[in-house]
Amino acid sequence: GVNSVQYVIKAYEESQGKSTEYIEALLESENDWNGTEDAKPKEVLFHEGRQIVFARTIDNVGNVQYASSNGIVIDSQKPDLIKVEIKNPSGNGIYNKNVTVLFESTDLIEDCDSFSGVKEIHYQAYLNGKEQTADGWSGTISRDYVATEQTAAGLKANDDAMKFSGEFTIPYAGVVSADAGARNSVTVRVTAVDYAGNAQMTDVISFDYDIAKPVLNVSFDGKAKNDIYFQTDRTVTVKVTDAYFKRNNYGKSDFVGTEFAFPADGYESGWKE
């Protein structure tokens, strides 16, 4: 009959590719067996990486039989988001076309040639701080890779699962305001999740949509004769209404509806307030 059943947890690399004789000799010299009376594995026995559970059965006359699992992967580390950036950036952070975001994530256990692999990418976009539910403003990009496969020979790592890269597009149609005075500030949060369920989030992507044409109003001071002729120089006042108007350089600005005036004969010299 069976006298005892014991187990020990070893790093996968200790027995990977080794002969049966080598492994049995390794186990015979092992002094750290856990008995059935202490059946719950101690937390300190597990560490990041690939593990193998070995069992030892001893009968009442001292015969020993060894068995083992194919291996498990312990992964409690979050995947890394090594790239989250806008494809074809505008240079000023303002866009009048759909913005595409590039991402790249990796999942590799530090100091160990093992990983569970990046399973999926989640993204959520916000307009002026408000979460949006329109199509394309949130989503999950997933794939069906197995980072570590159980084979007859044991655990086999799939290096293709270590990295996950791709892109997604935030469409402006139906969400972004076309009003000339409206600001459309967008923030995108991206989360990478590995097959072990660890998640890493970033919110480094921010940009503005501007799909509105500026409103331009031109007026003259003084009174014209016959609505055409003036006897003296007059001042032209140009009023621009646009959330992103900036004199001489299209870009972000806060002076919506600001008026600028200049002499009619001095236009070439530039604006004059």
Image (spheres, rainbow, N blue to C red):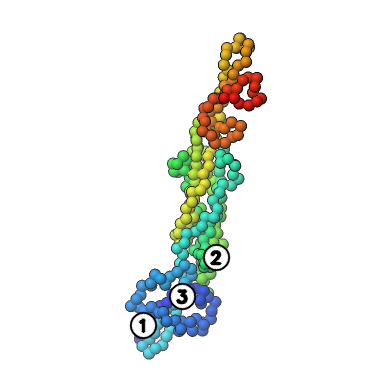
Q: To which residue does mark 3 refer? A: 10
Mark 1 residue crowding within 10 angstroms, few (<14) / some (14–19) / many (20+): some
Q: Quadrant of the C terminus?
A: top right
Is there CB contact under 8 Å for labels 2 and 3? no
Q: Secondary structure at mark 1?
A: strand
- Residue appearing at x 63%, y 19% in the figure: 264
Task: Answer with left or right where residue 230 lies relative to residue 174.
Answer: right
Q: To which residue does mark 2 refer? A: 158
From this view, report whether residue 27 is shown above or below residue 270: below
The answer for how far apart the CA atoms under marks 1 and 3 are is 20 Å
Q: Position of residue 31 (x, y in %)?
A: 42, 81
Q: Position of residue 34 (x, y in %)?
A: 38, 78
Q: Quadrant of residue 47?
A: bottom left
From this view, report whether residue 215 is shown above or below residue 50: above
265 or 229, which is in the foreground? 265
Mark 2 residue crowding within 10 angstroms, few (<14) / some (14–19) / many (20+): some
Q: Position of residue 232 (x, y in %)?
A: 62, 13
Q: Earlier in the sequence, mark 2 or mark 3?
A: 3
Q: To which residue does mark 1 refer? A: 4
- Residue appearing at x 39%, y 88% in the figure: 62
Q: Quadrant of residue 158?
A: bottom right
Taking the image as drawn, is residue 152 in sight? no
From this view, report whether residue 90 is shown above or below residue 161: above
Residue extending farthest left: 37
Taking the image as drawn, is residue 265 in sight? yes
- Tell me which amino acid carries mark 3: Lys
The answer for how far apart the CA atoms under marks 2 and 1 are is 38 Å
